[in-house]
Image (cartoon, helix red, strand yellow):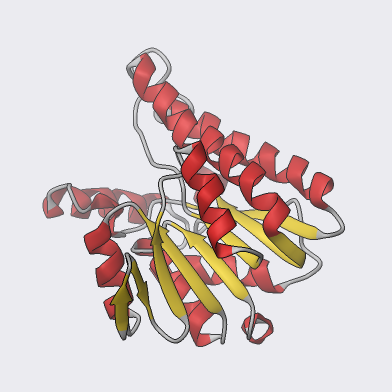
Amino acid sequence: MAAELKGRRVVIVGGTSGFGFEVARMARDAGAQVVITGRDAQRRDAALAALGAVDKAAGEVTTNAVSALALDIADEAALTDFFAHIGPFDHLVSMAGGAMGGGFLEAPLETIRQAVEEKFFANLRLARQAAPHVREGGSLVFTAGSGGRPHNASGAIVGNDAIRTLVEGLAVELAPRARVNAVAPTWTRTPLWRAMPASDVDAIEQRFNALIPLGRTAKVEEVAAAYLFLMSNDFVTGQTIAVDGGVTLVS
């Protein structure tokens, strides 16, 4: 399937580390022209260096197949300028959204509100700006999530369910010109947890190893492969694919 990305233009929002970086690497290897975005200049530069950067000028780092641009999707004007700058594209992948813990009574109201904002409204804002620029036959792929329950991840669960609803609505609104899907990973060891002590990350991983029917957490490339599948398969739309080792079947 990945061979179908050859020559296509793929935009990855949040492509400087973790799942986004691996999607960028795999799409590049499949022959795509890749644009990655991120708010942190050092991480953008590091990502491009890892992807084989050969030039840097005017705030844009470039390889033969990959470029990196600054973008804050919370800024409506910045989004408008971004899509005007890059022009038409074939596929957009969004990694926007975070994680949180705590139920509806336990977690601070602002924490719940922020989780929903970062997951749903940020991606809705992105979708509305991106939709006019996606080429016929292209797609949008968002990131939801698997695992957790309302009593221990309240705002995140609301946001993830909202992404599923967003995908179903957009899939109809954009058909037949373009497709819309999402990937829903469960907890995976990525740089998202860089600020947490390694011992705490180890403990979380061990807990998920015990919960997940397959007995382990995912490899980053296993999750990234789902994004490439959704970009490449022209007859899948409106779907949220769980890449979670079956954790939602038992938790």
Relative vertical location of residue 198 with respect to residue 66 in this rendering, above or below:
above
Instruction: Please give the name of the residue rendered at 70% of the width and 60% of the height, measured from the top-left corner.
Output: 134
Q: Position of residue 231 (x, y in %)?
A: 66, 68
Horizontal side of 189 relative to 166 (left or right) equals left
Q: Position of residue 27 (x, y in %)?
A: 53, 78
Is residue 144 at all visible to an observer of this figure? no
Relative vertical location of residue 110 with respect to residue 77 in this rendering, above or below:
above
Count of picture labels? 0
Q: Position of residue 206 (x, y in %)?
A: 27, 54
Instruction: Please give the name of the residue rendered at 47% of the width and 83% of the height, measured from the top-left corner.
Output: 65
Give the residue at the far front of this rendering.
58
Horizontal side of 21 relative to 9 (left or right) equals left
Q: Position of residue 192 (x, y in %)?
A: 30, 52
Quarter the N terminus occupies? bottom right
The answer to which quarter of the image holds residue 188 is bottom left
Which one is nearer the viewer's eye here, 30 or 205? Answer: 30
Instruction: Please give the name of the residue rendered at 25% of the width and 70% of the height, measured from the top-left corner.
Output: 46
